């Protein structure tokens, strides 16, 4: 058994998982936390991490470091993704992480981000299906991780990855770039869809999407859409993990969110406060990719890059 701490620092949120990982089989969570710090605030426009965003992240990271120590983590790895990759002042942020955590973050390329997401997302799919009393999803899997700054597309199966591509469409990036109205105008939505379609054209250059037997969606935009599609009275990770959401429900939820003013989105029982401003763009990415690729349903995973970091850290 290996006790590890994994930290995923994305464009919108920073998350912690401390887990006990056996040589084989499922890991046991000791703690799992998520805080929205919006590290990628303004990066698409300025190319730099904002000082206030760095400070928000530092405060939460200090709490995570203390938790990892208290729980006796033998190994710690922090992975930083799209916002940090893109920032001109990345070195300043890395120095703050070193001071706070005692080690530098791994600012991973898109391909490795995709690999970690695939590993985390697919490790527990069979168990989740059994818990729901449904058949296990079939491989090959197209795993789609909709982040704040980028979205990763990975095709693979039990033997590993076949292809992967990371593209710069994410819920924070597209909201800041296009969706300014409350609610956004039809023209803003159309411009966002055009950006998504342009990115999807890049995806199919590298990823043979047509080979996929199952679409697996992960990260907060997807799980929130699933919670709304399932009409849950409160956010319930167990109900969401392994659920299958038809494309018609994804379209319905997306249209509803994009028509809502901010106050109505904030009042939804399943909505995390940090996701209120960006959920419309996240839902639109999911809807557009399903329509463009002709995918009938999405299998929703609550496990993602964070779980992949932990598994890779413990098992190599």
Image (cartoon, rainbow, N blue to C red):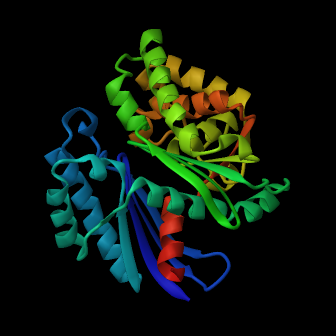
Q: Where is residue 299 drawn, in percent x and y?
A: 70, 47
Residue 270 shows up from this direction: no
- Looking at the image, which is closer to me, 10 or 265? 10
Which residue is rendered at x = 17% and y = 44% of the image? 50
Q: Is residue 81 left or right of residue 308?
A: left
Q: Where does the image place residue 13, in percent across and percent down from the top left?
A: 38, 50
Q: How many marks?
A: 0
Asked if residue 248 is positioned above or below residue 301 in the image, the reply reads: above
Q: Quadrant of residue 97?
A: bottom left
Position of residue 232 measured from the top left corner of the image (x, y, whole percent): 66, 40
How far across and how far down the image is residue 230, in percent? 70, 38
Specify the quadrant of the image occupied by residue 185: top left
- Observer-nearest residue: 26 or 305? 305
Q: Is residue 100 left or right of residue 313?
A: left
The quadrant where residue 247 appears: top right
> Which is more toward the observer, 163 or 177?
163
The residue lying at 65 percent from left, 25 percent from top is 251
* Left or right: where 161 falls relative to 6: right
Residue at the far bottom: name it: 1
Residue 211 visible in image: yes
Residue nearer the viewer, 86 or 216: 86
Quadrant location of the N terminus in the rendered image: bottom right
Q: Is residue 61 above or below residue 37?
A: below
Q: Is residue 15 above or below residue 255?
A: below
């Amino acid at each position: 058994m290996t006790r590890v701490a994994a930290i995923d620092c994305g464009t919108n949120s920073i998350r912690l998982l401390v887990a006990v990982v056996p040589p084989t089989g499922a890991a046991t969570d000791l703690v799992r936390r998520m805080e929205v710090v919006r590290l990628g605030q303004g990066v698409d426009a300025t190319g730099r991490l904002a000082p206030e965003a760095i400070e928000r992240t530092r405060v939460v990271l200090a709490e995570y470091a203390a938790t990892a120590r208290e729980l006796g983590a033998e190994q710690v790895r922090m992975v930083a993704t799209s916002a940090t990759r893109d920032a001109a002042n990345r070195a300043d942020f890395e120095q703050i992480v070193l001071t706070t955590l005692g080690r530098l973050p791994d600012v991973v390329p898109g391909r490795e981000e995709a690999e970690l997401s695939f590993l985390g997302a697919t490790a527990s799919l069979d168990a989740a299906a059994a818990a729901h009393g449904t058949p296990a999803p079939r491989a090959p899997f197209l795993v789609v991780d909709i982040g704040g700054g980028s979205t990763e597309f990975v095709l693979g199966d039990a033997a590993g990855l076949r292809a992967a591509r990371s593209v710069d469409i994410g819920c924070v990036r597209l909201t800041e770039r296009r969706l300014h109205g409350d609610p956004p105008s039809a023209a803003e939505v159309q411009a966002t869809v055009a950006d998504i379609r342009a990115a999807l054209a890049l995806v199919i250059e590298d990823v043979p999407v047509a080979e996929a037997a199952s679409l697996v969606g992960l990260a907060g935009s997807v799980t929130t859409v699933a919670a709304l599609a399932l009409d849950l009275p409160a956010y319930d990770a167990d109900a969401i993990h392994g659920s299958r959401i038809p494309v018609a429900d994804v379209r319905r939820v997306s249209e509803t969110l994009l028509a809502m003013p901010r106050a109505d989105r904030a009042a939804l029982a399943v909505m995390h406060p940090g996701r209120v401003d960006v959920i419309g763009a996240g839902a639109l990415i999911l809807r557009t990719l399903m329509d463009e690729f002709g995918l009938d349903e999405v299998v929703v995973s609550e496990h993602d890059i964070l779980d992949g970091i932990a598994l890779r850290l413990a098992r190599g």
